[in-house]
Image (tube, rainbow, N blue to C red):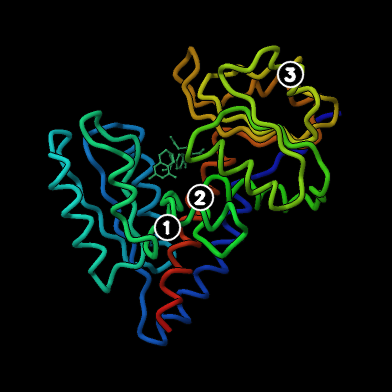
Amino acid sequence: MSAKIIDGKQLANTIRQDIKKEVEHLQTKGVTPGLAVILVGDNQASRTYVANKEKACKQLGMKSVLIELPATIDEQTLLTKIVELNNDASIHGILVQLPLPKHISEKKVIETISPEKDVDGFHPINIGRMMTGQDAFLPCTPFGILKMIQSTNIDVTGKHVVVIGRSNIVGKPVGQLFLNENATVTYCHSKTTDLASYTRQADILICAIGKAKFVTEEYVKEGAVVIDVGMSRDENGKLCGDVDFESVQDKSSFITPVPGGVGPMTITMLMYNTLKSAAKEI
Ligand SMILES: Nc1nc2c(c(=O)[nH]1)N[C@@H](CN(C=O)c1ccc(C(=O)N[C@@H](CCC(=O)O)C(=O)O)cc1)CN2
């Protein structure tokens, strides 16, 4: 079997067309969705991701405000900037690009963003709402992964979803999203013993480890869906994911590429969340 590619770019474009129409409708009511992105420091990867967010905003007719701060910025100045944006009626979504410099508490930053403008879905209020199946801003990468699986028309009810990785922005919330969809979820992580004994049980394997090409075919069950959340560079400096694509593609039924898979969907679901926030104004 050669896996079907879940084309994140194509799915993202389809969803963005719908978002663009909704933005145009909101504008007839005098509301233009506004997203504020704060970039602290000069991390090149973060700069690329922020540029993709700005580009998507402009593509969809949304207002995009980029606030660039030096890596030496003190925590209180950053928190004060966030509070200003919380009180700015033209801004419907606020995010601070992660990771942050070590001297700044990500927890304090995330908890300073108004939950009503937390379009990353990282605030404990939104995480709690998601955990209890209430309406919330869903974290963008997990939300995008759910949309990608839904695009395959696979019914996840009772399916065994194995998540490798337990970060607060991907691993933990993506498992919860699939639990909410009635899947059976197993979390694996760096302390898991005999990792392959779990991953080989997965009907849907979600790889969010941060290790280039770590997941090879011996970690994959025949016919599994493989979602690659990784974003690394291989020995030739080429973008790659956590999954060894060549090794795994003949064993899996569906697979997401890197680049062109989860990444564009992350951006798209950020646009979706920003639109959702703005739509509450009418
Ligand atoms: N505040 C946040 N920070 C971070 C988040 C987040 O959701 N909120 N997630 C990741 C990074 N991320 C979003 O910011 C992200 C990563 C990758 C892409 C993407 O478009 N990837 C492309 C390739 C991009 C490239 O050329 O390098 C792809 O996969 O096709 C978008 C967003 C950590 N920080």
| Mark sitting on residue 219 | 3
169 to 128, vertically: above or below: above
Left or right placement of residue 33 versus residue 254 in this view: left
Residue drawn 82% across the image and 51% down it: 155
Q: CA distance from mark 2 to mark 3?
A: 26 Å
Task: Find numbered disc 1 in the image and state the secondary structure of the residue it sits on.
Answer: loop
Quarter holding the C terminus is: bottom left
Amino acid residing under circle 1: Val
The answer to whether the residues at label 1 and label 2 have Cβ atoms under 8 Å apart is yes
Amino acid residing under circle 3: Tyr
Estimate the x, y position of residue 267 in percent, counting from the top left: 47, 50
245 to 171, vertically: above or below: above
Q: Can you identify the residue that label 1 sits on?
A: 119
8 to 246, vertically: above or below: below
| Mark sitting on residue 140 | 2
How many marks can you see? 3
Q: Specify few, some or many for label 2: CA neighbours under 10 Å numbering under 14, 14-19, or 20 or more.
A: many
Task: Find numbered disc 2 in the image and state the secondary structure of the residue it sits on.
Answer: helix
Counting residues from the start of the chain, the first of labels 3 and 1 encountered is 1
Residue 70 or residue 201, whichever sits in front:
201
Estimate the x, y position of residue 123 in percent, counting from the top left: 41, 52
Residue drawn 44% across the image and 77% down it: 280
Left or right placement of residue 14 versus residue 68 in this view: right
